[in-house]
Amino acid sequence: MIIIMSDSHGDREIVEEIKDKYKGTASAIIHCGDSELPSSDPVWKGITVVEGNCDFDSGYPEVATINAENKKIVVTHGHLYGVNFGLKQLELLAQDKKADIAFFGHIHRPVATIEDGILFLNPGSISQPRGDHHEKMYCKLELNNEGYHIQYLTRDHKPIKDLEFQLKYDR
């Protein structure tokens, strides 16, 4: 299980709560940027985190690459890859990194799609949602024999009914 959150915009408490809930059970906990917290904050111990356009601490990487659940994952905020206008630039990054999965934030909206064999996932925003879904959310990704099981959850860790997906592996 991989836990993904993004765009917490200064809300350290929810980052810590999600971390505490899943540490020891998740193979990875990811934050896709715009935390607005110092990169030296102890909350980041055990979390892969990247720099967002609202993070002004130079201690964050723009891109992180990790391995979890036997998949190579690239993590970025997305603002440097034009995610407001589509996934093509992010796809090129994922291909360059030979990633199976690309996690990104920035748009504050949930995205779960497979393009050219790569899973693209945006966990929405844990503090400032936009678009059709007004729920503050994060995401849980599980891999099974069928593919990717994706469940979006509220801040109080309840599943969001219309945001649960099973996507088949494409490669």
Image (spheres, helix red, strand yellow):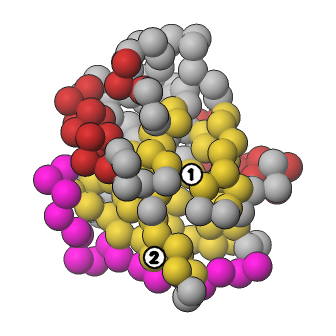
Number of the front mark, 1 or 2 = 2
Q: Is residue 142 visible?
A: yes
Identify which residue, 46 or 132, lies in the foreground: 46
Return the residue found at the far left. 156
Q: Is residue 124 visible?
A: no
**Quarter of the rendering containing residue 82:** top right
Three-letter amino acid code at the position of disc 1: Phe
Magenta-highlighted residues: 155-171
Return the residue found at the far right. 96
Reading the image, the residue beneath label 1 is: 103
Q: Is residue 78 left or right of residue 170?
A: left
Residue 161 in magenta stretch: yes
Which residue is drawn at the image coordinates 71% and 81% (left, top)? Answer: 170
Q: Which x, y percent locates residue 44?
A: 42, 26
Which residue is drawn at the image coordinates 37% and 48% (left, top)? Answer: 24
Which residue is drawn at the image coordinates 85% and 49% (left, top)? Answer: 96
Which residue is drawn at the image coordinates 47% and 82% (left, top)? Answer: 166
Q: Which x, y percent locates residue 35?
A: 38, 27
Reading the image, the residue beneath label 2 is: 149
Mark 2, other Cα within 10 Å: few <14 / some 14–19 / many ≥20: some
Quadrant of the rendering where the N terminus is positioned: bottom left
Three-letter amino acid code at the position of disc 2: His
Mark 1 vs 2, N-terminal side: 1
Q: Is residue 50 left or right of residue 66?
A: left
Q: Is residue 80 above or below residue 61?
A: below
Identify which residue, 127 or 168, lies in the foreground: 168
Quadrant of the rendering where the C terminus is positioned: bottom right
Q: CA distance from mark 1 to mark 2?
A: 15 Å
Identify which residue, 146 or 52, lies in the foreground: 146
Return the residue found at the far bottom. 146
Q: Is residue 162 left or right of residue 47?
A: left
Q: Is residue 168 above or below residue 137?
A: below
